Image (cartoon, helix red, strand yellow):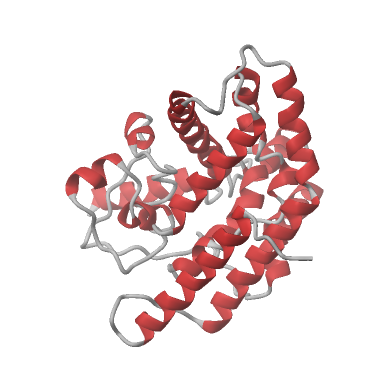
Amino acid sequence: MSFKPTLQDIFLLSRLTAVAVEAALGRLGLIRARYRLKDTAASIAMRFGNVGSNLLLAGLVAGGYAAAYEARLVTISPSSPWAWLALFVLDDFTYYWFHRISHECRFWWAAHVNHHSSKEYNLSTAVRQPWTGVLAGTWMPWIPLALLGFPPTMILTQQGFNLFYQFWIHTEAVRRMPAWYEYLFNTPSHHRVHHAANPRYLDRNYAGVLMVWDRLFGSFEAELDEEPPRYGIIHNIATYNPLRIAFHEWAAMGRDLRTERSARELLGFAFGPPGWRSDGEGPTARKVRADWQAGTRSR
């Protein structure tokens, strides 16, 4: 029996090859690329866990999209280039809001935070992906596209291409693209901002491919040369253990929910912004940014 690699196999192999090349070039001092062996190993382990969990639960996603497609408004042909162009824009718009909610709602943040947990920023960071996204329902924002009439195979394919584009922007080797490209598209510079824990940069630049959504919805922030990004999360976790990386925020949420004293606290701890506290003094991204802005103005 011959082995026929799938598109996902090819994508994964090409990513791991690119990680090895970037790490080697960085070690030789030919490009800016900082790698730590344990950190890189943890990211790769997260990726394999992500692939395994996605395969295990693929039927849930495929079944959900298929059920929505059965109730479609129209039938859209995958042979139409205009259909693919429309899907590219709609998928990217959907990705923006999925990604933004994943930062602003703790329930989805618990599935997404592991992608931000590394204090390094290189191509291996791109493969540090969640194990619990499918169970948390982070695939559901794409259901309206199936209801509209896009076949599930089209949706899944376009999602794959969107994520494949985002791989290369996880690097410090590229400082800036040409100005027109920086304006229109997501780039390493824009995405470094997204992965930074500096108050100025917190919860900014959610784009997948097109930066128009961040510019339109007020979440754009340019990278400043005088303020280099500090990567990671507000409260970094000191571990390279993939299990802790994957589940630490779910565990923290569970601990908080055990202490809740009202329905408001239950909803706040589960679905409020990460860092939410009932007294309003929790270290949410908005609070951290506001405190930083107040301190800046007072100086």
Q: Residue at x 29, y 64 (%)?
A: 174
Give the residue at the far bottom of this rendering.
28
- The reply to whether residue 265 is in sight is yes
Q: Position of residue 68 (x, y in %)?
A: 72, 23
Give the residue at the far top of this rendering.
73
Q: Is residue 190 above or below residue 144?
A: below
Q: Position of residue 15 (x, y in %)?
A: 51, 65
- The reply to whether residue 104 is in sight is no
Residue 272 sits in quarter:
top right
Q: Is residue 256 above or below residue 124?
A: above
Q: Residue at x 74, y 59 (%)?
A: 52
62, 5: nearer the viewer: 5
Q: Decide if residue 25 is on the left or right side of residue 133.
A: left
83, 265: nearer the viewer: 83
Image quadrant containing the N terminus: bottom right
Image quadrant containing the C terminus: bottom left
Q: Decide if residue 268 is on the left or right side of residue 163.
A: right
Q: Is residue 197 above or below residue 36?
A: above
Residue 18 sits in quarter:
bottom left
Q: Position of residue 160 (x, y in %)?
A: 55, 46
Q: Decide if residue 88 is on the left or right side of residue 108.
A: left
Q: Residue at x 55, y 59 (%)?
A: 11
Q: Decide if residue 30 is on the left or right side of residue 14.
A: left
Give the residue at the far left of this rendering.
179
Q: How many marks?
A: 0
59, 188: nearer the viewer: 59
28, 103: nearer the viewer: 28
Q: Position of residue 250 (x, y in %)?
A: 73, 54
